[in-house]
């Protein structure tokens, strides 16, 4: 990860709003298009078109050796799935990670979708519960950021939600990160309890919080494409992510259309726009 100052200026935070919105728009477009028969390469092209129409560049393409706009991780793939000619099947659980760079600033977010399948309701229900628990843990982590004194308090909030949701596993080898001029910056953002407090939560902190959760064991390996990370036991996985800014009046979810209003409401937290 790039080593830069952990805390950004008010002007920096304002500059990060646009790439955050472009990232959110790319994911919304992919969500609408993710249906049986659609390939992950087609989803990749849709996301790229949205980001470029917003005046941005897909920042994943700037990662050495990666040529795509999104990561598309299907079923047992946890993260970093490479788009391909693979068609989505009814019942698939699909995690999409996307990011935009505009004027040198970055956004990064991920969603998990379960493709409808009326013939296999039990499978869809099981996968949707996994996706929902992971999303809920993300919002719990973001809500914790609103009152936390130190960054590592977020992981405890995420872990509590996952542990209460079912016999799920929290991936430990991959964590969230700071974000700004580079897509991946310090500090690391853990999705589970760790020793130590981490950096202070204060205005100017911008982090990408991204729980990665499995239906079974958390052991993983990388496929021959040298990117896609899958579970060793073939169990399903889900991944949700938002880029979040702390500022002098509160926090704002940069990669949510409403700044996080709907997601944070169940936790009694009201995000405040950056000005």
Image (tube, helix red, strand yellow):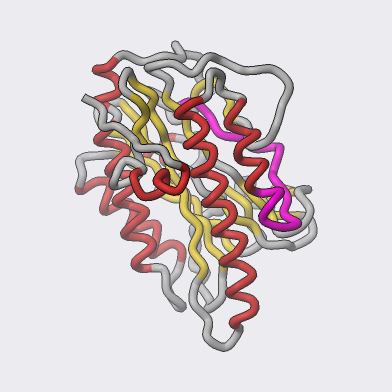
**Residue nearest the observer in this picture, 198 or 236:** 198
When asked about the image quadrant of residue 245, the answer is top left
Determine the residue located farthest toward the bottom in the rendered image.
119
**Is residue 84 shown left or right of residue 45?**
right
Where residue 79 appears, x then y in whole percent? 59, 49
Q: Is residue 172 magenta?
A: yes
Where residue 38 appears, x then y in whole percent? 42, 73
Residue drawn at x 57%, y 46% is 137
Instruction: Decide if residue 251 is in sight here.
Output: yes
Residue drawn at x 73%, y 21% is 195
**Residue nearest the observer in this picture, 140 or 255:** 140
Instruction: Decide if residue 68 is in sight here.
Output: no
Q: Which residues are magenta?
A: 162-178
Where residue 224 appears, x then y in whole percent? 68, 52
Q: Where 100 falls versus 234 (above or below)?
A: above
**Is residue 1 shown left or right of residue 174?**
left
Determine the residue located farthest toward the front in the rendered image.
268
When asked about the image quadrant of residue 23, the answer is top left
**Residue nearest the observer in this picture, 215 or 182:** 215
Residue drawn at x 57%, y 88% is 119
Q: Where 219 falls versus 189 (above or below)?
A: below
Residue drawn at x 64%, y 76% is 123
Q: Is residue 213 magenta?
A: no
Rendered-image quadrant of the C terminus: top left
Where residue 2 appears, x then y in whole percent? 50, 19
Q: Where 76 falls versus 119 (above or below)?
A: above
Q: Where 15 falls versus 73 (above or below)?
A: above
């Amino acid at each position: 990860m790039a080593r830069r100052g952990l805390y950004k200026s008010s002007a920096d935070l304002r500059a990060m709003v646009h790439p955050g919105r472009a990232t959110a728009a790319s994911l919304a477009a992919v969500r609408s298009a993710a249906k049986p028969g659609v390939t992950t390469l087609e989803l990749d092209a849709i996301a790229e078109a949205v980001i470029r129409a917003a005046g941005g560049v897909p920042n994943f393409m700037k990662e050495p050796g990666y040529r795509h706009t999104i990561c598309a991780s299907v079923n047992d793939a946890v993260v970093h799935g490479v788009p391909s000619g693979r068609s989505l099947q009814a019942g698939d659980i699909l995690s999409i990670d996307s990011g935009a760079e505009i004027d040198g600033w970055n956004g990064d977010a991920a969603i998990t979708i379960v493709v409808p399948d009326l013939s296999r309701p039990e499978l869809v229900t099981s996968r949707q519960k996994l996706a929902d628990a992971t999303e809920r843990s993300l919002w719990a982590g973001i809500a914790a950021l609103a009152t936390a004194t130190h960054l590592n308090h977020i992981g405890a909030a995420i872990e509590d939600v996952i542990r209460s949701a079912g016999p799920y596993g929290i991936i430990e080898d991959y964590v969230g990160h700071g974000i700004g001029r580079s897509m991946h910056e310090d500090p690391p953002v853990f999705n589970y309890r760790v020793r130590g407090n981490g950096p202070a939560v204060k205005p100017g902190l911008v982090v990408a919080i991204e729980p990665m959760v499995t239906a079974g064991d958390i052991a993983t390996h990388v496929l021959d494409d040298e990117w896609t990370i899958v579970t060793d036991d073939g169990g399903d996985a889900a991944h949700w992510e938002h880029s979040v800014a702390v500022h002098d009046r509160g926090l704002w979810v940069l990669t949510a259309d409403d700044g996080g209003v709907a997601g944070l409401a169940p936790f009694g937290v009201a995000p405040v726009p950056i000005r």
